[in-house]
Amino acid sequence: MSNHNIPDKSENQRIQRRNHYRLDCHIPTKFSLLREDESGQLTPYESHEGVICNLSGGGVKLLSKQEMQEKDFILINLHFDDCDLLLIGEIMVKQINTDATNKFQYGVMFSNISTFEQDKIVRYLFREQKQRHRLT
């Protein structure tokens, strides 16, 4: 696994998380906590499992048994259709539901997502939305 640079943060990234269609879903996923090494690189150090219950071109809502903190960075393995994406995300919101199996709920914003990766996600969202509309 290669190292990842710490993502740039900008006001545009913060605004864009609300500018994407969100799809409720149930996508099991694996993710790794990231930490910054001496050279400023983010490297994975702990792997966990969770469920993506909401997906957009700007981020995910992630449910997990793993407790993390706001501003933590994670590497998410996003798998849908025949596509596998490894995306860095920053935890922006943390909520706790003590009655749920995956009691921690996180709002995760993708950091430095490429146009190619975002396009793959958006195309998937449109296909799923269209298919769900047909079923109603």
Image (cartoon, helix red, strand yellow):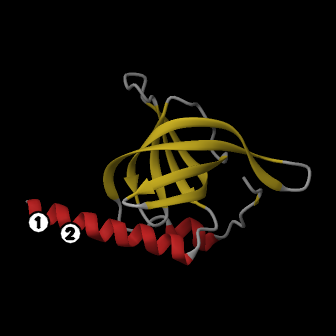
The residue shown at (90%, 55%) is 39
- Residue 29 at x, y percent in the picture: 47, 44
Which SS class for mark 2?
Answer: helix
Please, is residue 21 above or below residue 35 in the view?
below
124 left or right, relative to 65: left
- Seen from the viewer's position, the closer of residues 132 and 85 is 85
> Would you say 33 lies left or right of 104 here?
right
Residue found farthest to the front = 82
State the residue at coordinates (75%, 57%). Answer: 2
Residue 92 position, x and y percent, is 57, 50
CB atoms at circles 2 and 1 under 8 Å apart? yes
Label 1 Cα crowd, 10 Å radius (few <14 / some 14-19 / many 20+): few
Secondary structure under badge 1? helix
In three-dimensional space, the C-alpha distance between marks 2 and 1, rounded to whole angstroms, equals 6 Å
Residue, disc 2? 130
The C terminus is located in which quarter?
bottom left
Residue 15 x %, y % = 53, 69
Which residue in the protein does label 1 denote? 134
Q: Amino acid at mark 1?
A: Arg
Along the horizontal axis of the image, is 74 left or right of 102?
right
For this orientation, the residue located farthest to the top is 99
Residue nearest the viewer, comparing 79 with 64: 79
Q: Position of residue 8 (x, y in %)?
A: 72, 67
On residue 50, the disc is none
Badge 2, how many Cα within 10 Å: few under 14, some, many 20+?
A: few
Disc 2 marks a residue whose amino acid type is Lys
Residue lying at 49% horizontally and 64% vertically, measured from the top left: 58
Q: Nearer the viewer, residue 106 or 32?
A: 32
Is residue 94 toward the left or the right of residue 101 in the image?
A: right
Above or below for 2 versus 74: below
